[in-house]
Image: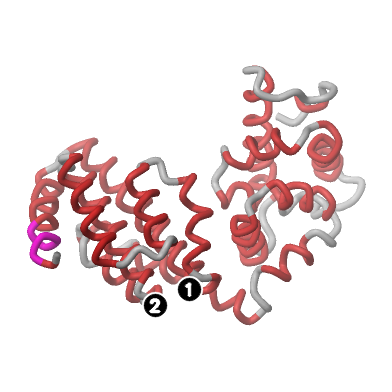
């Protein structure tokens, strides 16, 4: 498959280089977002094993890429995986950025399937994208490496979930911040069910959820962790610990994002929320 890969990579790279204006800006952003996801997953797979990748499939909008992940998780050989994925590639008639993103995922998943280290996975995808975007991958890699090393030194993520569920609330007791987070905690533990919590957490990025949870008390964190898939719960716990102290402004903004999702779901009739306290947290 090597000749096919390099031929298609060359064709996609030419199309990307010829893209101008807003389309180029949006395309480069999509490449960087893809690199960020791949970098993060490569470290988690290194730490937890290939099956952990399944927790990420719901976040992948492109169903063919999500399927690609599942093939690897299910133990499909690399030869068969490549054959299936290239068939889908040609059937979809992918061009430009879409083609390049597809190939980034294919190369990364095959690398992870072979047990390659995150640094190798990252170097592989870095070599495939425009220089101006590739330069930012080094920073992404360093961030994930620091988090990986930190967690390895502190017993991994499994113990962190329990630890974080035993901590007290972050804002100083008696402060306005404390009152706001107390109300938010009450709503999440007493006024909504697990379905609402799942809708809330599914609709938010990991970093936003981690920042918001920094402000909640242990029991509230536990309720949220219990609503998450096991592997994502570990990832959020690791992010919370690695983040360290966060600014109140950022904590509030993240919390408001969670409650915006809940209000929208309530207004659209997807969930029911007891009382009207939720309208205060905004």
Magenta stretch prevailing secondary structure: helix
Left-right relation of 275 to 258: right
Secondary structure under the numbered disc 2 in the rendered image: loop
Which disc number belongs to residue 46? 1
Which residues lie in the magenta part?
3-7
Q: What is the quadrant of the C terminus in the image?
A: top right
Q: Is residue 249 above or below residue 71?
A: above
Frontmost residue, 4 versus 35: 4
For mark 1, does the 10 Å Cα neighbourhood hold few (<14), some (14 to 19), or many (20 or more) residues? some
Q: Looking at the image, can residue 176 be seen?
A: no
**Above/below status of 39 relative to 19:** below
| Residue in view at x 52 percent, y 62 percent | 52
Callout 1: SS: helix
Q: In the image, 130: left or right of 213?
A: left
**Residue 167 in the image, given as x and y percentages of width and height:** 83, 61
Q: Are marks 2 and 1 in contact (CB under 8 Å)?
A: yes
Asked if the magenta segment contains residue 261, the reply would be no
Quarter of the image where the N terminus is located: bottom left
> What is the basis of the colouring in this image?
secondary structure
Residue most extreme to the bottom: 153
Q: Bin the neighbour count of mark 2 within 10 Å (Cα to Cα): few under 14, some 14-19, many 20 and up.
A: some
Q: Which mark sits nearer the N-terminus, 2 or 1? A: 1
Image point (64%, 57%), residue name? 230
Q: Is residue 208 above or below residue 191?
A: below
Which image quadrant for residue 198?
A: top right
Q: Horizontally, is 230 left or right of 169 in the view?
A: left
Residue on which disc 2 sits: 117
User: In the picture, residue 179 is in which quadrant?
Assistant: top right
Q: Does residue 199 appear in the picture of this structure?
A: yes
Q: Position of residue 127 (x, y in %)?
A: 22, 67
- Residue 206 in picture, x, y percent from top left: 57, 51
65 up-or-down from 1: above or below: above
């Amino acid at each position: 498959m090597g000749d096919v890969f390099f031929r298609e990579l060359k064709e996609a790279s030419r199309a990307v280089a010829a893209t101008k204006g807003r389309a180029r800006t949006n395309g480069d952003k999509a490449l960087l977002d893809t690199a960020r996801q791949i970098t993060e997953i490569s470290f988690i797979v290194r730490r937890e094993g290939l099956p952990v990748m399944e927790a990420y499939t719901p976040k992948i909008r492109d169903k063919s890429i999500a399927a690609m992940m599942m093939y690897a998780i299910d133990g499909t050989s690399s030869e068969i995986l490549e054959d299936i994925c290239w068939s889908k590639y040609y059937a979809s008639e992918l061009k430009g950025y879409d083609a390049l993103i597809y190939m980034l995922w294919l190369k990364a998943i095959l690398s992870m399937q072979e047990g390659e280290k995150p640094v190798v996975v990252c170097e592989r995808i870095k070599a495939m994208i425009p220089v101006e975007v590739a330069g930012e991958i080094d920073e992404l890699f360093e961030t994930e490496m620091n988090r990986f090393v930190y967690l390895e030194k502190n017993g991994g993520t499994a113990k962190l979930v329990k630890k974080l569920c035993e901590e007290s609330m972050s804002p100083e007791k008696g402060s306005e911040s404390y009152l706001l987070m107390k109300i938010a905690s009450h709503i999440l533990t007493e006024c909504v069910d697990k379905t609402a919590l799942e809708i809330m957490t599914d609709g938010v990025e990991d970093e936003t959820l981690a920042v918001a949870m920094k402000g909640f008390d242990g029991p509230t964190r536990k309720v949220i962790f219990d609503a998450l898939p096991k592997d994502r719960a570990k990832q959020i716990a690791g992010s919370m610990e690695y983040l360290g102290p966060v600014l109140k402004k950022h904590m509030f903004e993240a919390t408001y994002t969670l409650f915006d999702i809940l209000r929208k779901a309530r207004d659209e009739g997807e969930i029911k929320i007891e009382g009207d306290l939720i309208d205060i947290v905004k």
